Structure formats: structure tokens, C-alpha cells
Amino acid sequence: MREIMFYSDFPFGYHNREAEERMTRFAALGYKVHYVEKLGLRNPRPAQLRSVARRLAGGRAPARGPAPPFEVVSPTLMPPRRAPLIDGLNRRWLARQLLPRLEAPGEAILWLRFPTPEIVPLAQGSSFRLVVYEAVDEHRHGPGVTTRLRRVFDRAERAVLAEAGLVFASSEPVFDRLAGLHPNVVLASAAAVEPAPFAAAGERTPEARRALYAGSVDFRLDTGLLAAAARLLPDWTIVIAGPATREAEAELQAVPNVRLLGVRAPAEVPALIGEAAVCLMPYRVSDYGDTLFPVKLVEYVASGRPVVSTPIRAARDLASVVALAGDPESFAEAVRRAAADDTQAARAARMAVADGYSWERRIDQMRSAVEEAFARA
């Protein structure tokens, strides 16, 4: 039985459960998984102090849904993290929190989805048989990552790449960047879907003039474009299901035909898509946006529903089945046209594209790459 210490780029129970789903499937294949929650780069902000205190007390927020088939580890670090003395203590402390959980560290796999500097020493030396680095999006350009923190990230990533036997890239731009830095980079989109529930939802008769965005309402979403397009569609209901920042919530609540549903469990998403005539992907168009491959885009396509998106790279790659629009006027018009022109043949074409992003294919691909790299190690 292989043992994986999986360091996530999300806290456990986060709105996006893709990392948890991936490790659930590896656990089902017989791997013993330790899911380590993300620690990031920054010192905790005031709003995060409660979470830090809970971790120091040895607990974490209760998760919704059934218990996972793996251990969840909530390590802690002491601030200020960049201070030399504290940094050295944190690196040793993190190792003491993680390594004793492994039955045979020298035969285990360290799988990193974020190069937190304090975890880099675990990748170095002979603690693990294989180090896997999975680059999911360009976190180095994420919100709040200053020039100084980007340098910290880049140094840590280079150190991880020097030790990794296998690198997964979540999108073609990420692949292009890393292919010049490592000899074994595999393109494996983080977006994956279990097609059946979405295909079943797509069989439902949608509500006329109802559009849906299902996902986080944060810095990635072009809320200005979405609000303006909604005002141009006064006879439509624009439903938004997902956690929202305070600023985005205020902007969208001001639009009369926008309905904010808040956080919804992943199991509810297929039914929400089934109720919609058109699905929306109004992400900001930017260099960072072009590195993303949102799972919601694959979920939409798997249902067969028409999709209207801003022209980020992932949507351009699926332009055969996704309508692209970059400003409020063209976005609103594309929504009307997508609903009016929908056919059974178009639905079948969308669902066929989604087959290439099934969880079964993705896990088969990643497991094969991991086992080959493990054998070489």
C-alpha cells in the first residue's frame, strides 16, 4: 500500500472540493492518504486569528458531509513567519507535526500543491521516496501576493522542482512555464467531473430565462460585467450560487434580477444547473485568468446546457461548445442567443467534450504517472 502525504492548496471543507475528491479517489485505490491543510505564505490576518487559535488548540472547523476516507492534518506555524529565528523553528516544528504520521517515510510520496517555504525541507534529502509537485493555477499571481511574497514563492517553488520526480500542470500556460524548468511535466487539468449526475440534470426542462453562475464570487469573477449584463437582461433571473466577498455581494445585490443563494453543497450543483437555461462563466480576462481551468466550466458542459463565458484561455479551448463574449452588451446578447439556439445535437456535442474530463480518466492518468515516477525513484 502506497502512502501519500498530500499538502493541499485549500483548507479542508473549502467550497472547491476538487483536492478532496482527488485524494478520496486515490484512497479508494488503496493509497493511505494524509490530507494536510494549506498554510500559504502570509502571516495570519486579524480575521484569521480565530482559525489559528483553533488549530493551536488541536481542533478545526467541523466539516459538512460524510467523514473522508483519509486523515486530515491541520498543522500550525508561529508568526512572524519570515523572521529568521521563527522561520527555522517553524520548519522543524512542521516536520515534527507531519513526519511521525507516516508508517514508512522513506517509501512514502510527498505530494505538494503549494510550495509553502516551511514545507520545502521535507522535500529535500531522503525523507520521501518520491516528491510530486502539482501546480494548480498560478498562485504566485494570486490576490495579496506582493512582489516580496512572489519572490518567496518563487524560491520555494524552485527548491521543490529541484527535488520533484514528477510535476503536474493544471493548464497549458502553467505547463509551458514549468516545462522549461523540469524534465517530467505532465499536463493534467485540475478540472474533472463525474458526468452522470450532470447529464441527468441536463435532462430536466429548464426554467425559461434563468441563467446560473455556480462558484466562488471573488477576485476571479468580473462582477462589473456580470452586473451590467444582468441589467441588460431585465426579463431574466440571474442566479448566483457560491460564497461571495462582501464587496461583490453588495455590488450584485443592487441588481434587481440577481439572486444570491450563498454557499451550496457540491451535491446541489447538478440540480441548480438543471434548472438553468444558460450557464455563465464571467471570469476576468487577464494573464492570471488564462492560467485557470475552472471545474464549473466542465460541470456546465457535462450537463449539456449552453454556456456563455468571457474569453479566458480555458473557455477559448472549448470554443466549439462555449459561446464567448467580452463585454456586457455582447455577453447579454450571447445569453439570449444561447437559449434560443439550443438543440439536442448541441447538447450532445457539449456532453461529448466533457467525457475527456471525467474523474475516471483523470485519476487513471495521474496514477499511471505517479507509479512510473515511483518506480524510477
Image (cartoon, helix red, strand yellow):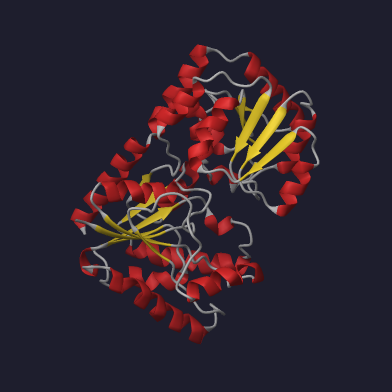
Image point (42%, 23%), residue name = 352
Q: Looking at the image, is 350 positioned above or below residue 154?
A: above
Percent from the top left, x then y, of residue 232?
79, 28
Question: Left or right: where does residue 227 sit relative to residue 261?
Answer: right
Quadrant position of the N terminus in the picture = bottom left
- In which quadrant will I find the C terminus? bottom left
Q: Is residue 295 visible?
A: yes
> Would you place residue 186 above or below residue 52 in this image?
above
Residue 99 locus on image (x, y percent): 31, 72
The quadrant holding residue 330 is top right
Is 169 on the left-hand or right-hand side of 363? right
Q: Nearer the viewer, residue 201 or 340?
A: 201
**Whether residue 311 is visible:** no
State the residue lying farthest toward the bottom.
85
* Residue 145 falls in image quadrant: bottom right
Measuring 71% from the left and 37% from the top, which residue is drawn there?
Answer: 259
- Where is residue 104? Give x, y as percent: 21, 68
Residue plotted at (44% across, 67% down): 74
Residue 111, quarter of picture: bottom left
